[in-house]
Image (cartoon, rainbow, N blue to C red):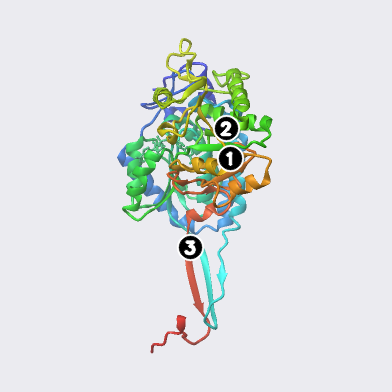
Amino acid sequence: TLTTTTPLADDVRAALQACGVDLSVVGGDAQVASPITGEPLIGARLDTVADIDAAVGRAAEAFPAWRDTPAPLRGQLVKRWGELLTEHKEHLATLVTAEVGKTPSEARGEVQEMIDIADLAVGQSRQLFGKTMPSERPGHRLQEVWHPLGVVGVISAFNFPVAVYAWNTALALVCGDTVVWKPADAARLSAIAVDALLAKAVSEAGAPKGIHQLLLTDADGSRKLVEDPRVALVSATGSVRMGREVAPAVAARFGRTLLELGGNNGAIVAPSADLDLALRGVVFAAAGTAGQRCTTLRRLFVHSSVADQLTKRVVAAYESLAVGDPREDGVLVGPLVNQRSYEAQQAALAAAREQGGTVLAGGDRELADAHPDAYYVRPAVVSMPDQTAIVHEETFAPILYVMTYDDLGEAIALHNAVPQGLSSAIFTTDQGEAERFLSSAGSDCGIANVNIGTSGAEIGGAFGGEKETGGGRESGSDAWKAYMRPSTQTVNYSGQLPLAQGVTFI
Ligand code: NAD
């Protein structure tokens, strides 16, 4: 039941096979279309409600054995997975490009992030540290120990179809949890390949088979996962709209959530900024990945003394960006993921115009004749008189709203005035200004950068944002703690029974 087109579909079939996927079991009704041409690639299976229930059941059943496996041994499984991801980097990148339209360079970068987090998780597997605290009672020891949580449900977004899943899964596995993954509808084939590589690592390591489960389902199926009381933690990446549905559903059963939701990222360009550097930082952050990163730069606040100069240069750079099939040499901006995304981009530009904005560059659809079912747009630069209603929204497309400011305090206030709080940046050579932006009175985001754009984080730091971005932190630093439960333990070796706070009883 395979429906294919060439040559994209041929590349995809070859990449899947190279990753050990049996193509005879891939075929199914859920067509995955490539945003590059709009043509169907290979149909994938669609799981039923009963399949979802069974998959959670298998993950729950596998948990005790995995929990009881020493963490450094769990790390060895992730180490092997990381080796397989390295070996198949090019195959996985091919799938990411075909399914979500990233340039090969960005697709490889995404797979590299998976390899990086696997490395980090292997080290972490020997460092699941708990603290020991001095007890106030003689002959007592007070300590915390971090225990595995249980089943972790990972829901991922189309725009980082495999990396964000790997951030969660590599850490969850070393932490002793089992994982049920619901990938984005647009990216089922890369999910099948990544899962096949994990299956290979699991089998080689002799780990319990059930510790990873792949659910190929839509948002309705995903809701079943969210509501299932056997799922201890739901780690969900996607829009604020999705988070608004997921968070209360999990809270209603007192489960845990780790939310990585939408961003509406801003950058300030100060009068002292190195404008060459700012230009490159701005253009990569705003137009890269066709504006479809959660950390994409969407709001630019430029000091009025340099605004004309910088804006002209950004416009010129935008006009020279090669938009098109991301597999072609020199192309930097691929397609939007689908027609809905294009309609949202057009609606946002219309709203911006209505709200007093002027489109200085881009915004129009391109290549419609060659690819009527694919949606390419030239990234847009829009000058706004102030931060109007549309600028408060995340439109998941390459639209950069430019505003001017005179006073840094005013710029920081405007920067923080949107509901989202993911990533932020300032371009300045004035240390005082940089420190002010990084301080608690500065950017209110989870990520704050100086002389770097808003996108392109490394996995070593914790990743995530505040306010409507959901408050979750993933990948480096202490993010592993979200996948474990602390047990506070008091051991009395005194032979007496002194009570805390000096309380007396029998
Ligand atoms: P989306 O919200 O449409 O879907 C994300 C995932 O959630 C998909 O797998 C989808 O099937 C599932 N889903 C949707 N509604 C659901 C529900 N009610 N219950 C359970 N699951 C549900 O997002 P998208 O279009 O795939 O991705 C783009 C969005 O993701 C943007 O808003 C972007 O900023 C955000 N994003 C955030 C981060 C981050 O780390 N903060 C990273 C990547 C993407």
Q: Is mark 1 within 8 Å of ligand 1?
A: no
Write down the quadrant of residue 27 in the picture: top left
Q: Where, quadrant-wise, is the N terminus in this rendering? A: top left
Which of the labelled discs sits on residue 486, or is there none? Answer: 3
State the separation of the CA atoms marked 2 and 3.
Answer: 38 Å
Q: Are marks 3 and 1 in contact (CB under 8 Å)?
A: no
Q: Secondary structure at mark 1?
A: strand
Q: Position of residue 449 (x, y in %)?
A: 60, 42
State the separation of the CA atoms marked 2 and 1.
Answer: 10 Å
Mark 1 sits on what residue?
425
Q: Is mark 3 within 8 Å of ligand 1?
A: no
Q: Secondary structure at mark 3?
A: strand
Q: Where, quadrant-wise, is the C terminus in this rendering? A: bottom left
Q: Are marks 2 and 1 in contact (CB under 8 Å)?
A: yes
Q: Are marks 2 and 3 in contact (CB under 8 Å)?
A: no
Drawn side of residue 115 relative to residue 156, left or right: right
Q: Please state which amino acid type lies under the numbered disc 3.
A: Pro
Determine crowd level at label 1: few under 14, some 14-19, many 20+ residues with C-alpha closer than 10 A. many
Is residue 198 at all visible to an observer of this figure?
no
Determine crowd level at label 2: few under 14, some 14-19, many 20+ residues with C-alpha closer than 10 A. many
* Residue ID at (36%, 32%): 46
Q: Please state which amino acid type lies under the numbered disc 2.
A: Ala
Q: Secondary structure at mark 2?
A: helix
